[in-house]
Amino acid sequence: MGLLEIGLRLLIWFLLTGNLSWDNVAIGVAATLLLPRQASAPVQWRDWGRVLQEILLAIPRAYWEAFEMILKPHTVEEVVYKQTLPNRSAGLVFLDIFLITFTPKTIVLNCNAQGTYEVHVLKPREDV
């Protein structure tokens, strides 16, 4: 089990529990090491770098989208399908879904084995 996978599992544990006491850290480390490892594609560091860059760009975009929704209500709903890159590791799939759901106008409804995300999108109504 790589350090990146251990770190991701611990990060998820601490985000879920919201507790950094010594007891919770010990339980988190034990759970991280005892959970079975899932076979996945090998880690591509270039992909991780791209995803981390997208995370940094998603934060101001989320604030901008929230500000847009305050000024002009978004009442049009649409479901779109987004294709991902092939051979994504489970961690990268999780971060892709997190990035899509992080912004206020989009949320992932479904993810299938072929790497397609079903995404619900809010758009402003266009007055004709």
Image (cartoon, rainbow, N blue to C red):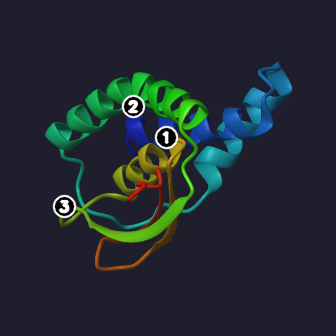
Q: For the residues labelled 2 and 3, say whether their Cβ atoms are less than 8 Å apart.
A: no
Q: Is residue 65 above or below residue 74?
A: above
Q: Report, in whole angstroms, how far the alpha carbon at label 1 lies from the one at label 2.
A: 7 Å
Q: Report, in whole angstroms, how far the alpha carbon at label 3 lies from the one at label 1.
A: 20 Å
Q: Position of residue 127 (x, y in %)?
A: 43, 55
Q: Is residue 53 above or below residue 51?
A: above
Q: Amino acid at mark 3?
A: Leu
From the viewer's perspective, tell me whether residue 28 is left or right of residue 75: right
Please tell me which residue lies in front, 97 or 89.
Answer: 97
Can residue 117 be seen in this snapshot?
no
Q: Position of residue 36 (x, y in %)?
A: 55, 62
Q: Nearer the viewer, mark 2 or mark 3?
A: 2
Residue density around tag 3, few if under 14, some if 14–19, many if 20 or more, within 10 Å: few
- Residue at 19% x, 61% y is 85
Q: Which residue is mark 2?
A: 58
Quadrant in which residue 64 is drawn: top left
Q: Amino acid at mark 1?
A: Thr
Q: Which residue is mark 3?
A: 85
First in sequence, mark 1 or 2: give its number.
2
Q: Residue furthest front?
A: 128
First in sequence, mark 3 or 1: give its number.
3
Residue density around tag 1, few if under 14, some if 14–19, many if 20 or more, within 10 Å: some
Q: Residue furthest bottom?
A: 113
Q: Nearer the viewer, mark 3 or mark 1?
A: 1
Instruction: Give the structural element (helix, strand or loop) at label 1.
Output: loop
Q: For the residues labelled 1 and 2, say whether their Cβ atoms are less than 8 Å apart.
A: yes
Q: Amino acid at mark 2?
A: Ala
Please tell me which residue lies in front, 18 or 59.
Answer: 59
